[in-house]
Amino acid sequence: MTAALTVVYAREPIPSPTAPSVFLAGPTPRVGSGAESWRPAALTELAAQWTGAQPLTVLTPESRGGKRAEHYDDQVDWETDARAAASVILFWIPRDLRTLPGFTTNVEFGLDVSSGKAVLGCPPDCPNPERNRYLIYVARRHGVPVCETLGDTVRAALAIVARQLDAASRGATTPDLT
């Protein structure tokens, strides 16, 4: 990991929404499922592709050290606030109904699809790609970038961040996306 990324884990303080940031939305492996998280690979891709002058904040709903929330509401509130504060919400959905069903992710995508800051990644070689068809359809209807690889999804997310930074440096006003 490079110093160009600042990773903020679930329930940690969310930095100022003026800093460039990406929220990593998508299914989280359940304890004991045997599934591996896709987020370490996303962090590697973000570190490799980020070229901004300032650090990129990455907001992840996974807990530092695997420590789960004491109260469900604490986790949900943090995720809701983090998605609202993020410059872009990167949805990566390697759908596997057995280990990474992503049912909560479906709801979050529905809430965020019109925000202007969502990017959708759905690998066609995941165990249940047919379960992503509707999300892909909705994304395209709303002009949300749809990608098939994690690298391309990261690239699309960082392009949105770059446009926001460019607009801010020119003093352009952008609509409040939260």
Image (tube, rainbow, N blue to C red):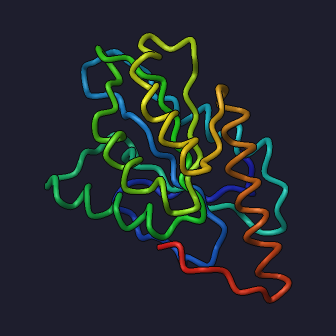
Q: Which of the 4 image quadrants contains residue 176? A: bottom right
Q: Observer-nearest residue: 110 or 126?
A: 110
The x, y position of residue 57, in whole percent, is 61, 61
The x, y position of residue 106, in whole percent, is 35, 39
Q: Observer-nearest residue: 152 or 76?
A: 152
Q: Is residue 170 left or right of residue 164?
A: right
For residue 177, above or below residue 34: below
Residue occupying image coordinates x 27% and y 28%? 30
Residue occupying image coordinates x 53% and y 43%? 139
For residue 89, above or below residue 48: below
Q: Observer-nearest residue: 148 or 140?
A: 140
From the image, which quarter does the N terminus lie in? top right
Q: Is residue 126 left or right of residue 55?
A: left
Q: Which of the 4 image quadrants contains residue 67? A: top left
Residue occupying image coordinates x 47% and y 53%? 113
The x, y position of residue 36, in whole percent, is 44, 22
Q: Which of the 4 image quadrants contains residue 47? A: top right
The x, y position of residue 84, in whole percent, is 44, 68
For residue 109, above or below residue 21: above
So how many labels did they put on this image? 0
